[in-house]
Image (spheres, grey):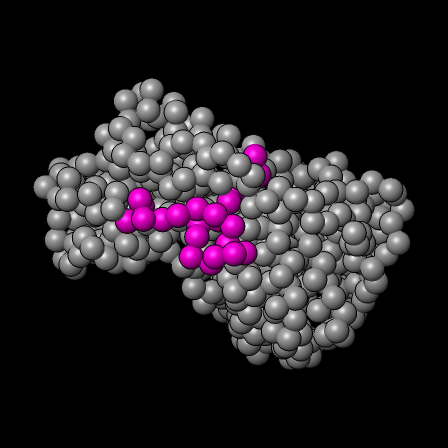
Amino acid sequence: MQIERNFFNGHFVEPASSALIAVYNPATEALIGQVSAATAHEATAAVDAAAAAQKTWGKLTSIQRAEHLRTLAGALEADAETIGAALASESGKSLTEASNEARYAAQITRYHAEWARRIEGEIIPSDTPDENLFLQREAIGVVACLIPFNYPVYTLLRKIAPALIAGNTVVVRPSNNTPLSAFAIARAVVKSGIPAGVINILTMDHATAASVCTHKAVGLITLTGSVNAGRIVLDYCKVNIAKPSLELGGKTPAIIEADADLEKAASDIIASKTTHCGQVCTSVERVYVQESVHDRFLALLKARISAVSIGDRATDGALMGPLVNASSRQNIHAMVQRAIADGAVLETGGVLPEGKGHFYPPTLLSGCRQDMEIIQEEIFGPVLPVLKYRDIDEALALANDHQFGLSSVLYTENYRTAMKVANAIEAGELYVNRTPADPYQGYHAGWKRSGLGGDDGKHGMLEFTQTRLVVMKY
């Protein structure tokens, strides 16, 4: 079995330690690979290489950096099937889905390359007649990128492409659950000819990750992960006052008005809940249904969720695949059991399957209350709790009564209702008559405990810059 080596300063480096991280297929539980665990010395060397490379990379014109990004996008597209094969085996996704993720990563890389001629400063009026104020956008330096397991290929490029176009260099820590695809990306980086040290990818334990994030050369730490992981990153940031950019927990509410297209809403929500086994930050996590259509809508949800079958997507892409690991499955099942004990009604699912693989059945719960754990805490799995409400004011109050504010959903045919919710929902995103999909020209940023800063679009790119004010007396 091949052992993947860490990639930094333009090379796959012979490991300094015999420590390995095992990678398993979550659908079969088979060992599919091993990756070298970076030592603290290697991690420091990678950050040092990134810092040295940034001095040159940052002096390139932005259009020169854009050409490198376009070449990288081409290499990602050329290697999409290879990257996809690695991702499918470690994540439980189908080969088609995983390969398309690599192609989407190429698309967002090209998108950020287009900022080359659009990173703008400002000319600000001075209080004195013989003076100009110039506000310039500059690179931060070295960026530490902490990548999640659920969309590890897309998220890796979602973070490094804007960092690079702004003139930064990066040190990437992929999830230890899904590192094989990251090294497939590293091979595409080599093919693209991006200068050594600009992109560095290493797997490591938490202690070594701390040494990367607290290195004095790291000026920004970007994470997609849990709230607890975000708190740890904030502690890292305190060491050198590094800038944080955090996408954290989500608990997307879906509000279903009586005038909604109920058939479409039910189909959309079940697709949202079962895509990648519900392991999506913006997946619908709680459904509020207007009481006059509650029973009908619950029946529609139950019919659709009951039709979803689970299994290995390597053999049938129409199946819903596994959760990431055994711990995740056990935690989700325990949440379902506690909800039932607290009065929720199990409509379907909720039983641990036998056999290999970290599968969990699509599960529908009715009769839930706002104070239940299943409503208040992120599930990150294929479990859908449903509540009823009287009017839109109550629905808004329930949707906003939460620690998270990443994304939200509304189904209605009434534009007044849509505008009311658009102006009052406490979330970084609202999707009307559809479920979330994070358009990369938008801005994916959470409120409350869902994060600081954000990804995508102009504002996501500007996260990777800092300003310099030049006061010019003449």
Q: Nearer the viewer, residue 384 or 70?
A: 384
Seen in the picture, residue 364 relative to 34 is either above or below; the reply is above
Residue 437: x %, y % from top left = 40, 59
**Residue 402 shows up from this direction:** no
Overall secondary structure of the magenta stretch? loop
Kindly identify the residue that appears in the image at 59 percent across and 44 percent down. Answer: 28
Image coords of residue 320 (percent x, y): 44, 50
Q: Using the rendered view, name the quadrant where residue 231 is placed.
A: top right
**Location of the C terminus (image quadrant):** bottom right
User: Residue 215: which quarter of the image?
Assistant: top right
**Residue 471 x %, y %:** 62, 66
Q: Quadrant of residue 121?
A: bottom right
Residue drawn 87% across the image and 42% down it: 18
Q: Residue furthest top?
A: 341
Is 320 magenta? The answer is yes
Residue 261, magenta (yes or no)? no
* Magenta stretch in the rendered image: 304-326
Evaluate whether residue 357 shows in this view: yes
Left or right placement of residue 472 versus residue 376 in this view: right
